[in-house]
Image (tube, rainbow, N blue to C red):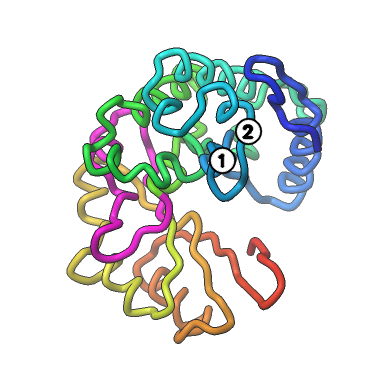
Amino acid sequence: MPAFEETVGVYDATVLAKLDDTLKLLHDNGMKAIISPHNANTLGGSAGCDAYCQKYGDAPTFYSSSNAKADYDNRLNEMLNYQSPNFGKAWKDMEEVIMAFDLQNEPLIGQIDLLNANDPDDWLCGRAGALRSALGSSNIKVATGGVGGSHYCCDHEFNTLEKAMQCDAIDIISMHGYMSKASDWAYYITGDREVLSGARAAGKNIMMEEWGVSVDYQDSFDTQVQVFNDAGVPWVSTTRTNTRWTAC
């Protein structure tokens, strides 16, 4: 698929049309989607250097520049107002098949200084406000997308960043992580660093949006998922085999 933006501000809806076909399949089977409108790893990270990376040079500039924020908000608005060929209305109105829009996939990943400073440029809540404005009266939710990437002890616990937790425009705190032992997850779900009570106090829902189990992990998929099921926490998994990643 061609990128949605090969040049910032020039939109090619080819990929949206293909995704719209996927949304139709989901809806036909009683399922809903969470849509991430951009991958932070394309800002010069593990997924290459996309149009935003090329225009703004590096991720810190992307997250701090007012021009970059405006460009990205335009991207969000363009996506949410995309007219679905299958549903006959804009994506922002398709709550029957879209559960939530992420701010971005793993926003601020690799930006340790900005994360430790609690998002000083208000990128997270600003983009959440832009999404909320574009959604209007829709019941589609705004999710964080896994702030900072994988959540792990004890110096990389950014999924529950205070700036996101206190943002009124955010509905769902998305948790991401890849941990070998079920007890490591229990530490964050029911243990000493549990995240549920803080989310409840902030009026947020918690979702295990991306977690992975490799074939060489100490605890199996079933053992790890029992932690989430016992706590009543919804989850989506990425299961790693020796040769590929598969979304479950």
Determine whether label 2 and label 1 are within 8 Å by CB. Answer: yes
Q: Earlier in the sequence, mark 2 or mark 1?
A: 1
Q: Indicate yes or no whether the magenta region holds residue 154.
A: yes
- Is 19 placed above or below 125 here? below
The label nearer to you, 2 versus 1, is 2
What residue did someone put label 1 on?
39
**x and y, in percent, of residue 76 in the image:** 56, 23
Q: Quadrant of residue 1?
A: top right
Q: Residue shown at 40%/54% (left/top)?
A: 175
- Is 187 placed above or below 110 here? below
Left/right of residue 151 with respect to residue 218 in the rendered view? left
- Is 227 placed above or below 61 here? below
Q: Residues within 10 Å of mark 2 (few under 14, many from 20)?
A: many
Q: Quadrant of residue 124?
A: top left
**x and y, in percent, of residue 201 in the image:** 19, 45
Label 1: which secondary element: loop
What residue did someone put label 2 on?
50
Amino acid of disc 2: Asp
Label 2: which secondary element: loop
What segment carries the magenta color? 149-175
Amino acid of disc 1: Asn
- Is 217 placed above or below 146 here? below
Left/right of residue 78 with respect to residue 186 in the rendered view? right
Number of numbered tags placed on the structure image = 2
**x and y, in percent, of residue 7 in the image:** 68, 20
Q: Residue shown at 40%/69% (left/top)?
A: 228
Dominant SS type (magenta): loop
Distance (Cα) linking label 2 and label 1: 10 Å
Q: Residue shown at 44%/77% (left/top)?
A: 224
